């Protein structure tokens, strides 16, 4: 029944991870999906209602029906020209001449607005000035954030004049061509030298990130080998739970960083949070690389020592991600998505460890068999001379007298316990220090004895099936 419960829980976590991934992809692709239909609208005078990296001039007799969005360019509405909709300009100036008409609202980010004609809606300027000439007629409010309002005598404003604080907003960065948006009519021609340097830069950046990930894993293995082994074991035991928790954590962190970043005064906390998220993901990649390297070594039969095994485990999937990053364009997004998914396993393992996720099932049955260990310790201490064989069942204090009394132990006749899924170099040393040197001897021990040696709960030893794996390896080697 317990196995059925675990499988059901794992399936639920897998479905949750799939749903979160699909929802995230939908959010990412939504702008491109929305941009495509806008390009197909019929234009009476102009080819498109969205302009990228270019100026827009509505000449006399020309009319645009619908909203207009301009990215990186100035807008001019001449006498007799009209825009029958809202006008939004990102990083550019707006000028409406006398006799020109904008039938909706005008919003400008990082740009000034000069009105001498008619605007039936409201005017809003972020980080720019608004100047109204004598012939200007504004049907709504005029509001400015970080700018000034200049109204000439005779200008008509039917709404209110709102002046926001001068917060010295920096100009918006260049947006470039958005995904799915039409390209400028005359794209710049890149020379072979430009392509070479651009590709070289992407190669160096990919190698730098890969090197930082490998170096982080090596340092962790040298400083905290026992913790790394414990985290790797948790990843194996609760893979689905770790992936779901890590993916949700990463997506929430990215969303929070983006929200803080667009709020200019909160950019320093966004930078600190970004550094923290990067550090956590580097540790997560190290955990995943440890397990991937172990599986590759087992499959290829290669006796790779640590930390080279973990380095290979990081470099193998990292090379694919780096190659996609070097290709750029949409492959760069795939590289980012692959890195996010890969690190989610390790980040989720950290959350499982810190928040003790999934521990309820392990502790619910009440198999806390560790308390009897103190009662068994005095017995072993009193009878250690008379019962050398049973002394091997005790914990680390007893191995010293046990090892020389075992006549069947031959120096060098030891099995590699790291072949067992869930046991690393640290646990391998603990078991051998306790007098357990072969798979057969490990298979003869009880879960409680093994748990006392490796400092695990008994339920975790049973879930990891250490004894069953040792028995199978002993039969295979025998």
Image (cartoon, helix red, strand yellow):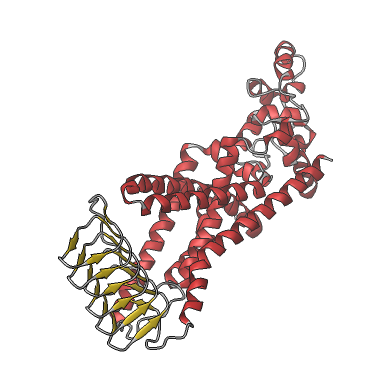
Q: Residue at point 52% right, 48% down?
A: 284
Identify the image quadrant of the N terminus.
Answer: top right
Q: Is residue 443 in sight in this rendering? A: yes
Name the outermost residue toward the left.
153
> Number of callouts in the render?
0
Horizontal side of residue 12 vs 224, given as left or right: right
Q: Is residue 112 above or below residue 476?
A: below
Horizontal side of residue 252 vs 407, given as left or right: left
Question: Residue 91: x, y in percent?
Answer: 28, 67
Q: Quadrant of residue 313?
A: bottom right
Q: Is residue 420 above or below residue 426?
A: below
Q: Is residue 303 in sight in this rendering? A: no
Q: Is residue 423 above or below residue 121?
A: above
Q: Is residue 398 above or below residue 248?
A: above
Question: Residue 204: x, y in percent?
Answer: 36, 64
Question: Residue 53: x, y in percent?
Answer: 31, 76
Q: Quadrant of residue 122?
A: bottom left
Most foreground residue, 360 or 193: 360
Question: Residue 377: x, y in percent?
Answer: 70, 16
Most foreground residue, 211 or 344: 344
Q: Residue at point 50% right, 37% down?
A: 224
Q: Residue at point 76% right, 32% down?
A: 447
Horizontal side of residue 340 vs 447, given as left or right: left
């Amino acid at each position: 029944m317990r196995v059925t419960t675990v499988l059901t829980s794992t399936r639920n976590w897998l479905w949750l991870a799939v749903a979160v991934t699909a929802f995230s992809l939908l959010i990412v692709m939504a702008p491109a999906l929305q941009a495509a239909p806008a390009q197909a609208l019929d234009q009476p005078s102009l080819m498109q209602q969205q302009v990228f990296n270019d100026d827009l001039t509505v000449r006399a007799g020309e009319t645009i029906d619908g909203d207009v969005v301009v990215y990186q360019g100035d807008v001019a509405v001449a006498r007799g020209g009209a825009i029958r909709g809202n006008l939004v300009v990102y990083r550019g100036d707006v000028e409406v001449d006398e006799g020109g008409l904008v039938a909706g609202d005008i919003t400008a980010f990082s740009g000034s607005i000069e009105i001498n004609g008619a605007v039936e809606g409201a005017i809003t300027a972020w980080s720019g000035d608004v100047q109204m000439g004598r012939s200007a007629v504004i049907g709504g409010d005029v509001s400015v954030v970080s700018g000034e309002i200049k109204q000439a005598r005779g200008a008509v404003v039917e709404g209110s004049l709102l002046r926001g604080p001068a917060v010295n907003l920096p100009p918006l960065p260049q947006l470039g061509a958005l995904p799915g948006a039409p390209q400028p009519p005359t794209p710049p021609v890149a020379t072979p030298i430009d392509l070479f340097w651009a590709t070289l830069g992407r190669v160096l950046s990919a190698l730098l990130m890969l090197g930082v990930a490998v170096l982080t894993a090596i340092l962790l293995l040298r400083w905290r080998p026992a913790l790394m082994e414990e985290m790797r074991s948790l990843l194996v035991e609760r893979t689905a739970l770790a992936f779901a928790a890590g993916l949700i954590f990463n997506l929430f962190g990215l969303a929070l960083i983006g929200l803080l970043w667009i709020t200019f005064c909160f950019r320093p906390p966004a930078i600190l949070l970004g550094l923290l998220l990067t550090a956590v993901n580097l540790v997560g990649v190290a955990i995943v690389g440890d397990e991937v390297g172990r599986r590759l070594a087992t499959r290829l039969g290669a006796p790779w020592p640590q930390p080279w095994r973990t380095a290979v485990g990081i470099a193998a999937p990292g090379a694919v991600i780096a190659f996609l990053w070097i290709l750029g364009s949409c492959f760069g997004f795939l590289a980012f998505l692959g890195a996010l998914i890969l690190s989610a396993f390790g980040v989720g393992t950290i959350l499982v460890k810190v928040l003790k996720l999934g521990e309820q099932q392990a502790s619910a049955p009440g198999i806390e068999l560790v308390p009897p260990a103190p009662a068994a310790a005095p017995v072993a201490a009193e009878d250690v001379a008379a019962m050398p064989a049973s002394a091997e069942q005790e914990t680390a204090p007893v191995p010293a007298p046990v090892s020389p009394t075992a006549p069947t132990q031959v120096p060098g006749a030891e099995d590699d316990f790291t072949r067992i899924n869930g046991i690393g170099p640290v646990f391998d040393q603990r078991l051998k220090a306790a007098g357990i040197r072969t798979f057969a001897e490990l298979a003869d021990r009880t879960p409680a004895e093994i748990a006392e040696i490796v400092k695990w709960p008994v339920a975790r030893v049973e879930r990891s099936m250490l004894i069953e794996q040792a028995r199978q390896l002993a039969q295979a080697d025998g």
